[in-house]
């Protein structure tokens, strides 16, 4: 089925049908110009109108003012852009305070437009596609009383089971209005048995998979941190009972946004679901002047009737092909070593030179100088905001270490934390008002640092100038962008009182503006994001930076869960994953280097340990693993990824990578705790050619259908905890 948007009329109802070979999305216009939702799911060839919502008398469900019967109510009919106060008592997608204080709105259908291709949203990370890869349906709705126009954008792509939605609101009146809520998407779904899938977490334990029942009432998943945050990913799913990685129905909703977000799942008295996603409306208010517009972020909405792996493939494909804009999006990522765990901030040129030389001997490709190279920083209490070289540590500046790194055949990277400032810094002493604060209130401190107000142009300009001076001073190939606290005492001193509800959104818009500017100026630099690890790991960040530090938890055992959960939405090539020192700084756990390497080699691999402390056997292992990774890098970073065994439900974890033509695959298997008389696990693979024969680890042979349907026993030695196996498959 070709990519298309069909417009038809059935029984005086206008029907819009977006479809490709994988997915259909159907909506229409019913009585009183109500934009109604009909269907989102597996592709269908046509729609006859049979799912038109029945006209039923539901007590306490108001009717339209000119109603001739009691059988048609906004309180029951499935909608695409619901309001509150004109008959619908469910969660609204839009709330606008008007000059008379009213927040009642009622948007009616006014027209549509279909365009080829997909442009990015101005000032926001968003999807993109050329004219042959996507079509956009824009529905125009009007509230004639409030003098507001809403434009709902629906994008369908040629090769993805994904719909992308966003909303634009325009003030057509002569007075200011205040947008209090504007969801990026809202869908009403008939009675069903779906369960809620979410990815909650905490610092160093991000994106833990949880599936739970949906009960009557309203469930809210959100962040009020002015950041997508460790605690709640801007994602949720609806899944059929007993969904597995390879079977069952699954819907996923992923907001392309890095600030405060909110997802709402409401089960009404008739067991219908209303689901919404967008900017968090807590303390949000946007002053919309006459003729001005406000644009919501985009939501990627994916569908699968083949389980969670297939759902993930949709998101992985969308992020790689239609979200990431970096030149590195489709380029192999280098093996790096970061000096953090080796030295923390206690280093000088001599110590760094020893690490760099040893790293070169280990066939590492990129050396990253982490925190502590700037200002007078020897601990985390000083110098953020002073982006100039600490000459006491590096008397020859960055050039000496950069030149040495390049001479040894490696690339050089550098750590920044641009959004932050220390009280003990030249920048703060010169501009204390640049730190986000509320007048006449004490300013909370976290990690001994404050947040710079990136919602203000002068602040961004200063930091940009400082960063450019550093990046222009020597050859820098990689930047790690860190962000280590959330905002408190939120306020923007440049805004009047009636616009303080804009502060959080303006902050993240400022971050986006800065990232767009710096990545455009330095397209050859590989940028990797970080926020206390994976605290701002979201599609919005990946638009600018093609990889993100997955978690500050570098313990390989914990990382199996973290990377497994992250992969539900984000491709392995977006995840930074390093081999840490042991005992691990987060858990104190001592895990052998084979296990640690296998976990790290499942993503963008690297090291944080001190290479000078490695034993001779560990050195040999590191060299072997690095050479192996280089040979298999493109398969791991850009192959089709399959989760096989969940570490959340068992004592094992497993996943695999398959290349495009199914000629090669790599399987990782992890056994956590050693057990006496341990039960045997059958490992069934995925994504292979069922009609082809594969050789496993160079000797055993089996057909693809056997490996996927019958499986085999991955035998581990139960001599100690935390053992791992690797299987390489080649088609013959």
Image: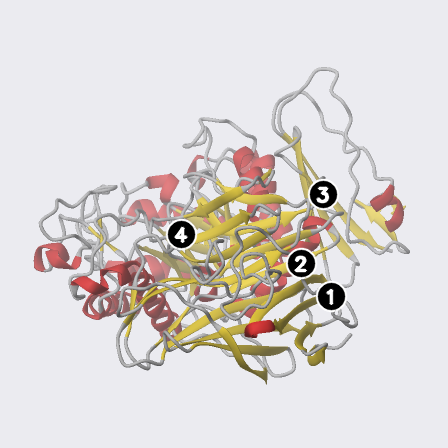
Secondary element under disc 2, as helix, strand or loop, is strand
Q: CA distance from mark 3 to mark 1?
A: 20 Å
Q: Are marks 2 and 3 in contact (CB under 8 Å)?
A: no
Q: Quadrant of residue 124?
A: bottom left
Secondary element under disc 3, as helix, strand or loop, is loop
Q: CA distance from mark 2 to mark 3?
A: 14 Å
Q: CA distance from mark 4 to mark 3?
A: 31 Å
Q: Residue at x 24, y 59 (%)?
A: 397
Q: Are marks 2 and 1 in contact (CB under 8 Å)?
A: yes
Residue 530: assigned label: 4
- Please give the residue where the numbered disc 1 appears in the rendered image: 22
Compared to 183, does 234 lie above or below?
above
Q: CA distance from mark 2 to mark 4?
A: 29 Å
Q: Residues within 10 Å of mark 1 (few under 14, many from 20)?
A: many
Residue 380 spot, x, y in % from top left: 24, 43
Q: Quadrant of residue 118?
A: bottom right
Q: Residues within 10 Å of mark 2 (few under 14, many from 20)?
A: many
Residue 534 appears left or right of 375:
right
- Please give the residue where the numbered disc 3 appears in the rendered image: 244
Residue 303: assigned label: 2
């Amino acid at each position: 089925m070709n990519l298309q948007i069909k417009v038809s009329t059935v029984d005086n109802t206008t029907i819009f049908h977006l479809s490709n070979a994988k997915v259909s999305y159907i909506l229409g216009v019913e009585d009183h110009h109500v934009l109604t939702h009909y269907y989102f799911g597996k592709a269908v060839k046509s729609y006859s109108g049979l799912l038109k919502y029945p006209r039923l008398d539901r007590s306490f469900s108001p009717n339209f003012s000119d109603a001739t019967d009691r059988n048609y109510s906004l309180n029951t009919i499935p909608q695409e852009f619901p309001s509150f106060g004109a008959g619908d008592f469910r969660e609204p997608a839009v709330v606008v305070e008007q000059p008379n204080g009213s927040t009642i709105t009622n948007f009616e259908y006014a027209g549509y437009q279909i365009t080829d291709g997909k442009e990015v949203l101005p000032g926001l990370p968003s999807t993109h596609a050329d004219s042959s890869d996507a079509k956009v349906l824009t529905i125009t709705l009007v509230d004639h009383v409030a003098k507001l126009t809403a434009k709902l954008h629906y994008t369908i792509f040629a090769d993805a089971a994904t719909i992308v939605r966003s909303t634009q609101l325009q003030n057509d009146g002569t007075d200011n209005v205040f947008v209090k809520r504007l969801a990026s998407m809202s869908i009403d779904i008939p009675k069903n048995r779906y369960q809620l899938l979410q990815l909650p977490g905490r610092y160093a334990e991000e994106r833990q998979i949880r599936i739970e029942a949906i009960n009557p009432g309203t469930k809210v998943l959100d962040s009020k941190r002015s950041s997508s945050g460790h605690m709640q990913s801007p994602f949720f799913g609806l899944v059929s009972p007993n969904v597995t990685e390879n079977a069952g129905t699954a819907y996923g909703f992923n907001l392309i946004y890095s600030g405060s977000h909110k997802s709402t799942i409401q089960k009404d008295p008739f067991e219908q679901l209303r689901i919404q996603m967008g900017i968090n409306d807590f303390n949000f208010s946007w002053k919309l002047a006459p003729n001005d517009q406000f644009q919501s972020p985009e939501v990627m909405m994916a569908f699968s009737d083949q389980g969670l792996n297939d759902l993930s493939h949709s998101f992985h494909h969308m992020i790689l092909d239609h979200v990431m804009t970096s030149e590195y999006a489709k380029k192999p990522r280098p093996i790096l070593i970061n000096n953090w765990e080796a030295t923390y901030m206690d280093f000088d040129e001599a110590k760094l030179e020893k690490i760099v030389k040893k790293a070169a001997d280990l066939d590492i490709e990129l050396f990253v100088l982490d925190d502590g190279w700037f200002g007078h920083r020897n601990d985390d209490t000083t110098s953020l905001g002073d982006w100039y070289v600490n000459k006491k540590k590096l008397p020859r500046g960055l050039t000496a270490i950069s030149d040495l790194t390049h001479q040894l055949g490696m690339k050089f990277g550098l750590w920044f934390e641009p959004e932050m400032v220390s009280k003990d810094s030249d920048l703060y002493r010169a501009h204390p008002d640049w730190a986000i604060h509320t007048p006449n209130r004490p300013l909370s401190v976290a990690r001994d640092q404050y947040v710079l107000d990136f919602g203000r142009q002068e602040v961004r300009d200063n930091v940009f100038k400082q960063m450019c001076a550093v990046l222009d001073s020597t050859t820098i190939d990689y930047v790690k962008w860190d962000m280590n606290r959330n905002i408190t005492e939120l306020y923007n001193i440049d805004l009047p009182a009636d616009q303080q509800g804009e502060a959080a959104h303006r902050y993240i818009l400022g971050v986006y503006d800065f990232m767009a500017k710096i990545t455009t100026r330095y397209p050859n630099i590989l940028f990797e994001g970080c926020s206390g690890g994976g605290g701002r790991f979201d599609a919005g960040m990946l638009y600018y930076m093609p990889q993100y530090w997955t978690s500050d938890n570098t313990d390989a055992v914990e990382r199996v869960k973290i990377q497994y959960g992250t992969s539900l939405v984000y491709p392995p090539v977006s995840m930074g994953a390093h081999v840490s020192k042991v005992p691990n700084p987060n858990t104190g756990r001592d895990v052998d280097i084979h296990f640690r390497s296998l976990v790290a080699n499942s993503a963008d691999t690297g090291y944080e340990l001190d290479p000078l402390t490695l034993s001779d056997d560990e050195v040999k292992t590191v060299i072997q693993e690095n050479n192996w990774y280089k040979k298999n890098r493109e398969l791991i970073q850009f192959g089709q990824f399959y989760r096989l065994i969940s570490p959340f439900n068992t004592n094992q974890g497993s996943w695999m990578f398959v290349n495009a033509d199914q000629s090669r695959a790599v399987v990782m298997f992890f056994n956590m705790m050693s057990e006496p008389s341990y039960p045997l696990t059958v490992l069934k693979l995925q994504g292979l050619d069922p009609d082809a024969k594969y050789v496993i680890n160079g000797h055993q042979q089996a057909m693809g259908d056997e490996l996927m349907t019958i499986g085999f026993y991955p035998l581990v030695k139960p001599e100690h905890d935390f053992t791992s196996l690797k299987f390489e498959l080649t088609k013959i």
